[in-house]
Amino acid sequence: MNQVTYVGHATLLIELDGVRILTDPLLTPRVSHLMRMSRTPELDLERLDVVLLSHLHADHVHLRSLRLLGWDRQLVAPRGSAKYLSRHGFNHVTELSAGESLRVGGVTIQATPSEHAGRSIPGRPQTDCLGYIMQGGRNIYFSGDTDLFDGMSAIGRMTDVALLPVWGWGPTLGAGHMNPYRAAKSLEMLQPSLAIPIHWGTYFPLGLRPLMSHRTNRTPYEFARHANKIAPEVQVCVLDPGDALDLSGFYARMGTPT
């Protein structure tokens, strides 16, 4: 089965051609000043083949969540990350730069650029930010945190399914992020057949849940409305945190060979 499960925030379990891939694992009820307000799905994490890390910001490389997965997981991270991760006990790290790739089972994982400089985190090295294309029976693009950038057009030539961030966790977005409209604009360059909005509706600052949950829970549907006007040929599927989409079934319903 080829399937995408939206765990929440930027965490997805991607099952592609028998390979099980987890992105940017954030699995705890609390992350610093943020509280998880959506359910954490029960996942079979024993059978993970690889974990993809897009960048070293604390809500994407969360050490406590990585420890929950075990010390021996194969991690893929931006070049310059391995020494830092090794200091924390993670020694199975493959570093990639944009354009480089590795093979995991029958899936090729290629690192892509990202427009997300962001702020440096004390104690963590400054590295590039990456996205990843997972190439198998379907080509799935996980962008990590990013804003629009010209290189999306080249990524689009390899993309069937786009997993796109449409918000974050606070009342505002800093530089290097897409809001619902800009995420919809990215579809003009990426031209996937299917887009799934991510990075919304999972964690909120302490005390702001009554205000923030309504705001961020609207963002994937705002993205869908913009996408319908900007790129009507792209199907949008909104998954609540914990929901899964069977890609084989989805494409069968569309009449596309699986």
Image (spheres, rainbow, N blue to C red):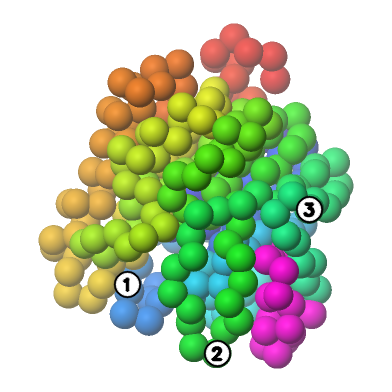
Do the residues bearing badges 3 and 2 touch, measured as CB atoms within 8 Å?
Answer: no
* Other-residue count near label 1 (Cα within 10 Å), few / some / many at <14 / 14–19 / ≥20: some
Amino acid at dot 1: Met
Depth check, front residue: 49 or 233: 233
Residue 231 vs 213, above or below: the answer is above
Residue 134 vs 138, above or below: the answer is below
Residue at the (17%, 69%) spot, across then down: 208
Residue at the (54%, 31%) spot, across then down: 190
Depth check, front residue: 39 or 239: 239
Left or right of 92? Residue 203 is left
Foreground disc of the pair 2, 1:
2
Residue 121 vs 179, above or below: the answer is below
Gap between marks 3 and 1, in whole Å?
35 Å
Amino acid at dot 2: Gly
Q: Which residue is mark 1?
A: 35
Residue at the (30%, 29%) spot, across then down: 226
Per the rendered image, the range of residues in magenta is 76-91
Residue at the (64%, 34%) spot, across then down: 154
**Which dot marks residue 100?**
3
Residue 88 at least partly seen: yes
Foreground disc of the pair 3, 1:
3
* Other-residue count near label 3 (Cα within 10 Å), few / some / many at <14 / 14–19 / ≥20: few
Counting from the top left corner in percent of width and height, residue 170 is at 26, 64
Q: Where is the N terminus found, in terms of image quarters?
A: top right
Q: Which residue is mark 2?
A: 123
Mark 3 or 1, nearer chain start = 1
Amino acid at dot 3: Glu
Mark 2 or 1, nearer chain start = 1
Gap between marks 2 and 1, in whole Å?
23 Å
Instruction: Give the SS element for disc 1.
Output: strand
Counting from the top left corner in percent of width and height, residue 104 is at 83, 51
